[in-house]
Amino acid sequence: MMVARWSIDAKFGYKQKVIDLMQGWMRDIGPQAGLTADKLRLITGSVGALESTIQSEHIIEDLNELNEVWDKLAKIDAHKQWSQELEPYVVSGTNRWEIYRVID
């Protein structure tokens, strides 16, 4: 099992707007790509982390599953629209993926 973490930083004053858009993505778009609510969570910086950072964590079985999700997302028009809606509220160049292995 793995955790795929997507991270982005909100522009000053827009953190709640980014969180709202991310929650909408998790509710409306993620499931279309196979990401169900039980495999997703949203976290944000608090102590020792940038407060502007918002991360979505996706529980996946392996990298093949993540690649399948990415392939599906590329074909979802609502995902493209969501990306354009999100863009004005985030710091350009801060989006990144981190992949962690879960140790049992």
Image (cartoon, grey):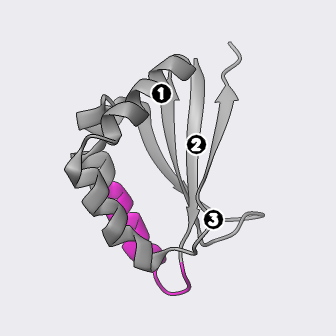
The residue at the point 60 percent across, 24 percent down is 2
- Residue 28 lies, with reference to residue 71, above or below; the image says below
At label 3, which amino acid type do we have? Thr
Q: Which of marks 1 and 2 is nearer the N terminus?
A: 2
* Residue 92 % position (x, y): 57, 73
* Residue 13 % position (x, y): 50, 87
- Separation of marks 1 and 2 at Cα, in angstroms: 14 Å
Residue closer to the observer: 46 or 35: 35
- Residue 50 lies, with reference to residue 24, above or below; the image says below
- Separation of marks 3 and 2 at Cα, in angstroms: 13 Å
The residue at the point 63 percent across, 65 percent down is 94
- The quadrant where residue 51 appears: bottom right
Q: Which mark is residue 19?
A: none
- Secondary element type, mark 2: strand
The residue labelled by disc 1 is 67
Q: What stretch is highlighted in magenta?
A: 11-23
Instruction: Answer with left or right where residue 95 lies relative to residue 75.
Output: right
* Residue 87 % position (x, y): 42, 72
- Separation of marks 3 and 1 at Cα, in angstroms: 21 Å
Q: Which of marks 3 and 2 is nearer the N terminus?
A: 2
Residue at the limit of the structure toward the top, as seen here:
104
Residue 71, can we see it? Answer: yes
At label 2, which amino acid type do we have? Arg
- The quadrant where residue 32 appears: top left
Please check the rendered image and state whether residue 89 is part of the magenta-colored stretch, yes or no.
Answer: no
Residue at the limit of the structure toward the right, as seen here:
48
Q: Nearer the viewer, mark 3 or mark 2?
A: 3
Residue closer to the observer: 63 or 43: 63
Q: Residue 94 carries which label?
A: 3
The residue labelled by disc 2 is 5
Is the residue marked by circle 3 packed among few (<14), some (14-19), or many (20+) residues within 10 Å?
Answer: few
